[in-house]
Image: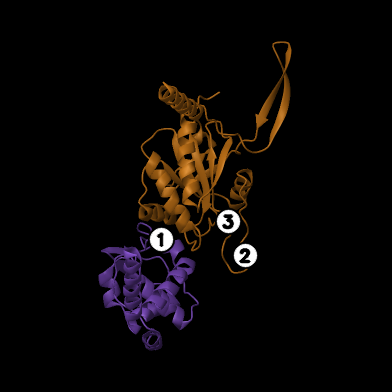
Chain colours: A purple, B orange
């Protein structure tokens, strides 16, 4: 009998916890889990399961400083690729990154995944934000 | 008493398993034919296994490499090109594990043939090797004639195909294990980390095998 009461209380607490998740948190979770699949299909071959890159050939995705300072150009990098030199974690990379034919929502998803995985923690990169960023691609 | 019997049984079983492990021999793959010849007045039938054809290539240091340079070596072969965006990075990541496991041991090599020799010149291969973080003579990146590479590839059981319409090379991503007598002893999916672990284990078995 006692056990039942405890079980019911635990269940109620669980419900409370789930329903208390804010809208933002739910949006983040949606973006993040969709982004994880897109990452597997479009990024993982080169950048690795853990975003580790490949030695001096393919940059790692763990440079949180780079990601932070280039937050508004990341969408352009994903969509149009990259041909010029970049420096990641003090290492210079000059190989070309190919463009990815992704919809803006997919770019928002995958960027949310990348910027909140591998030790990064930048919050949701939303669809409206990606829309604005994409109009400014050089 | 019962317990003792069970314990002895377990020990015996354990040893039996260990013994089997030591005896593991890798198969010899590829085509084979029987050759009958006369030795000392007696007719003897021998099996001749498929071997890798003679090669003539240049490595990332600009040195000429032919099949003599691989004599007496166990080696792993694969095909790649430096600008490959699809499976090559996974293959190289996995091959690096093989390299790191055996880079200090003698009689072992990795040979990666480029299937885009026009772009992958010697300086391009050298830069690629540097960026991959490989040095010394354990891992050779080889450039040669495209036709020849395709012939070698065929004998390695790997199909390397002509450029597809989208402008990318297709290849199978296999790692092939060759023994000291240039016979094929195993093929492994170079994009699958578990198969590459098996490759590393198999190299150890092959290294311990006496050359007959």
Labels 3 and 2: the sequence-earlier one = 2
Confirm whether residue A100 shows in the render.
yes
Whether labels 1 and 2 belong to a single chain: the reply is no
Whether label 1 touches label 2, CB < 8 Å: no
Element under disc 1: loop
Which residue is more in the foreground, B175 or B84? B175
**The C terminus of chain A: image quadrant:** bottom left
Percent x, y of residue B8: 43, 22
Percent x, y of residue B206: 49, 32
Q: Label 2 belongs to which residue? A: B164
Q: Nearer the viewer, mark 1 or mark 2?
A: 1
Percent x, y of residue A49: 41, 60
Mark 2: give few (<14), some (14-19) or many (20+) Cα within 10 Å.
Answer: few
Residue B32 is labelled as none
Q: Label 3 belongs to which residue? A: B171
Between the residue at mark 3 and the residue at mark 2, the CA separation in whole angstroms equals: 11 Å
Element under disc 3: loop
Q: Label 1 belongs to which residue? A: A48
- Circle 2 marks a residue in which chain? B
- Circle 3 marks a residue in which chain? B
Between the residue at mark 3 and the residue at mark 1, the CA separation in whole angstroms equals: 20 Å
């Amino acid at each position: 009998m006692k056990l039942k009461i405890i079980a019911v209380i635990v269940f109620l607490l669980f419900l409370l916890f789930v329903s208390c998740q804010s809208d933002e948190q739910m949006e983040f979770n949606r973006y993040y889990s969709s982004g994880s699949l897109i990452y597997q299909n479009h990024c993982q071959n080169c950048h690795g399961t853990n975003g580790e890159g490949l030695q001096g050939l393919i940059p790692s995705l763990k440079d949180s400083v780079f990601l932070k300072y280039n937050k508004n150009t990341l969408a352009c990098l994903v969509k149009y690729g990259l041909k010029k030199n970049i420096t990641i974690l003090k290492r210079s990379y000059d190989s070309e990154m190919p463009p990815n034919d992704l919809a803006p929502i997919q770019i928002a998803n995958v960027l949310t995944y990348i910027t909140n995985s591998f030790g990064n923690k930048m919050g949701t990169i939303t669809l409206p934000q990606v829309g604005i960023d994409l109009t400014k691609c050089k | 008493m019962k317990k003792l019997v069970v314990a002895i049984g377990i020990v015996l079983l354990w040893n039996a398993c260990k013994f089997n492990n030591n005896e593991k021999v890798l198969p010899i793959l590829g085509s084979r034919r029987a050759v009958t010849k006369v030795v000392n007045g007696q007719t003897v039938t021998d099996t001749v296994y498929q071997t890798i054809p003679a090669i003539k290539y240049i490595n990332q240091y600009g040195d000429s490499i032919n099949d003599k340079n691989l004599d007496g070596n166990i080696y792993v072969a694969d095909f790649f090109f430096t600008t490959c965006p699809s499976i090559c990075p996974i293959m190289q990541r996995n091959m690096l594990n093989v390299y790191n496991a055996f880079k200090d041991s003698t009689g072992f090599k990795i040979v990666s043939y480029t299937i885009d020799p026009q772009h992958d010149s010697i300086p391009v291969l050298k830069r690629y090797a540097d960026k991959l973080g490989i040095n010394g003579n354990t891992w050779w990146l080889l450039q040669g004639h495209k036709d020849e590479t395709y012939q070698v590839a065929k004998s390695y059981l790997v199909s390397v195909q002509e450029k597809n319409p989208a402008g990318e090379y297709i290849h199978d991503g296999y790692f092939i294990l060759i023994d000291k007598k240039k016979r094929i002893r195993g093929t492994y999916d170079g994009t699958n980390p578990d198969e590459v672990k098996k490759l590393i284990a198999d190299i150890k078995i092959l290294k311990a095998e006496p050359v007959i």
